[in-house]
Image (cartoon, rainbow, N blue to C red):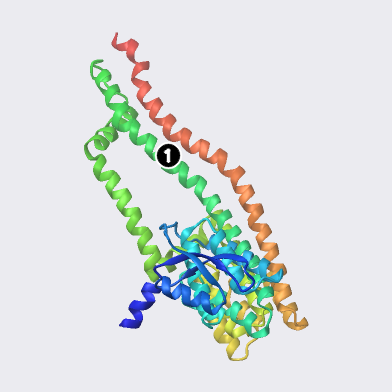
Amino acid sequence: MATAASARTHKEFVFEWEGKDRNGKVVRGETRAAGENQVMASLRRQGVLTTKIKKKRMSSGKAIKPKDIAIFTRQLATMMKAGVPLLQAFDIVGRGNANASVSRLLNDIRADVETGTSLSSAFRKYPKYFDSLYCNLVEAGEAAGILEDLLDRLATYMEKTEAIKGKIKSALMYPTSVIVVAFVVVSIIMIFVIPAFKQVFTSFGADLPAPTLFVMGMSEFFVSYWWLIFGVIGGGLYFFMQAWKRNERVQQVMDRLLLRMPIFGDLINKSCIARWTRTLATMFAAGVPLVEALDSVGGASGNSVYADATTKIQQEVSTGTSLTSAMTNANLFPSMVIQMTAIGEESGSIDHMLGKAADFYEQEVDDMVAGLSSLMEPIIIVFLGVIIGGIVVSMYLPIFKLGQVV
């Protein structure tokens, strides 16, 4: 209990200090410790005479996103390639980061490494931010003495993966936002505009057209039960998204549906193939054995259908089946990917051939997103025109009969 408590205290405070080294040069820095005495003792062992220590105020900071980890990895790889020592590189990146949450995370990892923990082991303490693929590659780099090269390869992989995610999100965000805006506009019309028209039409004393009566009936429902409509839609979306995230069965069903969607299904399928091949190429190039590398590949694809197929591929490969045959049996991969994998197995350059396949499908995703953006614009214009225009025409039909009433 005491050890746990002290560990929490150790992670709670960051001290800014200033002092002089053995040559009398003024040095400054930050140290994470339980108190000022620990800071002074630590600096004394390093030959630093402390002149000033101040506890640093810690802001809450924003949430740490995969993009933050990708940027940190690129910065760390760049500095290590430039010859900056690991601990100093962590110190520079941590202090220069605008997100306080990232700075605290890097300070914690730096403290672990400073006490003798390996970098991969320090990363494994934070699985929320560093997955098994990340940790395995770092561990392989440490074992082979090529950590800076592996970090550079890992940074490239993460940048490409985040780029694909961003393109998929942007392609899906446009129609989603338009649907939301259309619903809000229709709700405002139904609740505030249509009732005003209804009062006018009641004074006409004429029979109203069927489309007008339908729209007015919808308006009455919105006015009476707007709280129920918004509650059911908002609550339904929230619980559905939570079930999608947390329930494995719902996730599997939705992932299958996404792959079968018209237009968008092909885009998602190609993005999964790009991420799958890129991940396996990166792991294999780092010297990770194929069976072990497949552990991380399925989850990195971002789709449970590919994750399940990867598990079966791993089982077949572990029993002596070639990777090409196992991928063929999965019935998920296009013939081009399978052929390039076969060439890679025959020539001993699987990582190179899979990397080429990943480049091809990443370009395919780029082209599809560009094409979808231009395709969706007229579709959305027609969609909005039918809904909003239909309501407007329905409400103006009685006005055309006004002459008959008069």
User: Which amino acid type is marked by label 1?
Assistant: Val
Secondary structure of residue under mark 1: helix
Q: Does residue 97 appear to the left or right of 359 in the view shown? A: left
Q: Residue at x 69, y 68 (%)?
A: 357
Q: Does residue 185 appear to the left or right of 196 in the view shown? A: right
| Residue 28 rendering spot, x and y as whole percentages | 56, 64
| Residue 303 rendering spot, x and y as whole percentages | 51, 67
Residue 72 visible to the viewer: yes
Given the current orientation, which residue lies at the most extreme front position?
24
Closer to the camera, 272 or 200? 272
Closer to the camera, 114 or 181? 114
Q: Residue at x 57, y 79 (%)?
A: 136
Crowd tier of the residue under label 1, counting other residues whose Cα lies within 10 Å: few below 14, some 14–19, many 20 or above? few
| Residue 385 rendering spot, x and y as whole percentages | 47, 33
Given the current orientation, which residue lies at the most extreme bottom position?
319
Given the current orientation, which residue lies at the most extreme top position?
406
Quarter of the image for residue 230 reads: top left
Closer to the camera, 64 or 238? 64
Closer to the camera, 191 or 207? 191
Q: Quadrant of the N terminus?
A: bottom left
Tell me how many marks there are.
Answer: 1
Q: Residue at x 74, y 79 (%)?
A: 349
Quarter of the image for residue 375 reads: top right
Q: Residue at x 36, y 78 (%)?
A: 6
Residue 310 visible to the viewer: no
| Residue 146 rendering spot, x and y as whole percentages | 69, 79
Per the image, the residue denoted by label 1 is 181
Q: Does residue 312 appear to the left or right of 85 in the view shown? A: left
